[in-house]
Image (tube, rainbow, N blue to C red):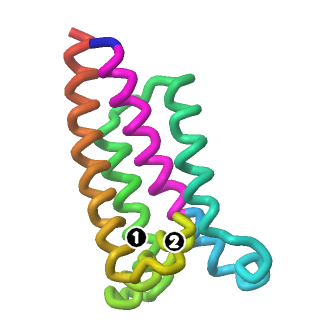
Amino acid sequence: MYRRENILRVLYHVLVGFHTGLVLALLCAQWTWLELRVNTGMLILLGCLLGPVYGLRKNAGRPLLRGSFAVLAVLGAGLLITQGDVAAMRILVGAMVREGMFLPDLSLQSAELIFRGLGLLTILVAAVYSRAAAKKVK
């Protein structure tokens, strides 16, 4: 039971770190000078690496709220950057996921499907982790 809870906690923090890194990458990509000199998609991997480190040191309070907020933050940042154009946001997020995963041959549609799947997985893992944390408290 203890091992399953730790795996769930690490997976939760990897997914939230992915979305946090994606928001930072989207925002940093708007700075042209930085975008031309640095692969801003690396912020996604940095978020995936730093998320579990933070998660193992500190227990997450309200994981479902934080997980949902991470997904909504990506959508909000994407819509803000593209000025509400959903088609442009899909391309932007797909390109950033493709760049962050170092898969230049991956199509934008596939990268967007990966993002959608990770978004749903984040909310699902957050719900399960929240439920497990509530049972532990009782």
Q: Which residue is mark 2?
A: 103
Provide the residue span drawn in magenta: 3-23
The secondary structure that most of the magenta stretch takes on is: helix
Name the outermost residue toward the front: 105
Above or below, comparing residue 93 to residue 126 in the picture: below
| Mark 2 neighbour class, 10 Å CA radius: few under 14, some 14 to 19, many 20 or more | few
Above or below, comparing residue 129 to residue 23 in the picture: above
Task: Name the residue type under label 2.
Answer: Leu
Task: Name the residue type under label 1.
Answer: Gly
| Mark 1 neighbour class, 10 Å CA radius: few under 14, some 14 to 19, many 20 or more | some
**Marks 1/2: CA–CA distance:** 25 Å
Residue 82 in percent (x, y) is at 45, 87
Q: Are marks 1 and 2 in contact (CB under 8 Å)?
A: no
Residue 18 in percent (x, y) is at 48, 53
Residue at 39% of width from left, 82% of height from top?
108
Occupied quadrant, residue 31: bottom right
Looking at the rendered structure, which numbered label has been put on residue 76?
Answer: 1
Mark 2: secondary structure: loop
Please identify the quadrant where the N terminus is shown: top left
Occupied quadrant, residue 40: bottom right
Q: Is residue 61 magenta?
A: no
Q: Earlier in the sequence, mark 1 or mark 2?
A: 1
Residue at 24% of width from left, 56% of height from top?
120
